[in-house]
Image (cartoon, rainbow, N blue to C red):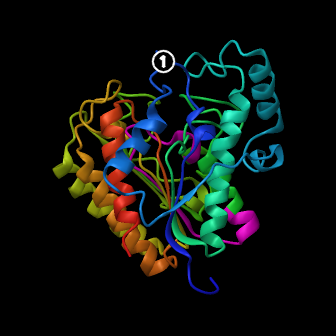
Amino acid sequence: MAGRAVSQLCLYTGPELARYAFGGEHPFGPMRHDAFVSGLERLGLDRGVCRCPPVQASQDEIERFHTHAHVEQVRRRSQAGTGFLDQGDTPAFPGVYEAAAAVVGTVLEAVDAIMGGRCRRAFVPIAGLHHARRDGAAGFCVFNDCGVAISTLRQFHGLSRIAYVDIDAHHGDGVFYAFEADPWLIFVDLHQDGHTLYPGTGSATETGVGAARGTKLNIPMPPGADDAMFAREWARAEEFLRQAEPDFILLQCGADSLAGDPITQMAYTPAAHRRAARSLCALADEYANGRLLGLGGGGYHLGNLAAAWCAVVEEMSRA
């Protein structure tokens, strides 16, 4: 990375990201973005970081991960503005294509900012849509920005050992199965046990297939898992990542693993997210030239969401 980074952290917010929401009665409602920004500004965490606007992805960029047929299906549903993009979790609305493309484009802009030396780390709150498959939407996720980012880092930045770390309450199945046979995608996911929560996947025996066996670490957590349990399991995750020596780290830091979320049964506090962010910053500094991208993920209690993501931003913005 040539020269000195302009900023420690690039932070992406704006109305284009806020539009990725499914209405007031849906868990993924319209106030998530603004709740985070309000918390950020109240704590003064917006000072000393580079505030950046969202960017729209092109169809070609989205298709670095997704099939053409899926992207075209989302376009049609977006124009019609009715129906569902999956089996009932992810409703279409007028402009859903543009809203989802803004999530992908902003994440790609964050990748470019890190790789281009404009910042060492970046955070995108409305992102981390880890359930979408290559050929379909799922679980509130229209396009999988995580998958597009991984594919872009490979194809356009020449990185091989990319680490994807997920502490959302739900298993990141859309990422896991897309790269299950890829030995160079290091995958670590701590999530509520799939026997008790959507999408029902992510057992400890799922470690990758073929040449990729052993490059994936799934850690199912029981309902009610707290910070002490997270700390014990995180030590194992940290050692796994250290042995992998990644070139770039993505953190999907869904806040639905905090106590009180309306659709999950975990019991973390923001301290768990702070621990993960602090640890990954140190690992990124040691192995990846500081390159760490944070993606907000889930979280359906607005106070929890703001607290967890602000803890992550605070750690990522430290010199």
**Position in image of residue 249 (x %, y %):** 50, 64
Residue 143: x, y in percent?
66, 38
Mark 1: which amino acid? Gly
Q: Which residues are magenta?
A: 153-175
Residue projecting furthest to the left: 228
Q: Is residue 265 left or right of residue 80?
A: left
Residue toward you, 216 or 309: 309
The image position of residue 44, as x and y in percent, is 34, 56
Choose between 76 and 88: the one closer to the eye. Answer: 76
The answer to whether residue 126 is left or right of residue 1 is left
- In the rendered view, does 191 fall on the left or right side of 34? left
Q: Is residue 160 visible?
A: no
* Left or right position of 121 against 270: right
Look at the image and tell me whether residue 252 can be seen: yes
Q: What residue is at 67 percent from the left and 42 percent from the top?
A: 102
Number of residue marks: 1
Residue most toward the bottom? Answer: 3
Q: Does residue 234 sit above or below 100 in this rendering?
A: below
> At 75% from the left edge and 45% from the top edge, which residue is drawn?
62
User: Residue at 30% of width from left, 45% of height from top?
Assistant: 307
Q: Is residue 45 magenta?
A: no
Along the viewing direction, whichever of 126 and 244 lies nearer the viewer? 126
Label 1 sits on a secondary structure element that is loop
Placement of 258 over or under 153, stated as above or below: above
Q: Position of residue 211 (x, y in %)?
A: 60, 62
Q: What residue does disc 1 label?
A: 24
Q: Name which residue lies at 59% across and 69% down.
A: 114
Badge 1 crowding class, 10 Å Cα cut-off, few under 14, some 14 to 19, many 20 or more, is: few
Query: Does the magenta portion include 162?
Result: yes
The C terminus lies in which quarter of the figure?
Answer: bottom left
Residue 79 appears in which quarter of the rendering? Answer: top right
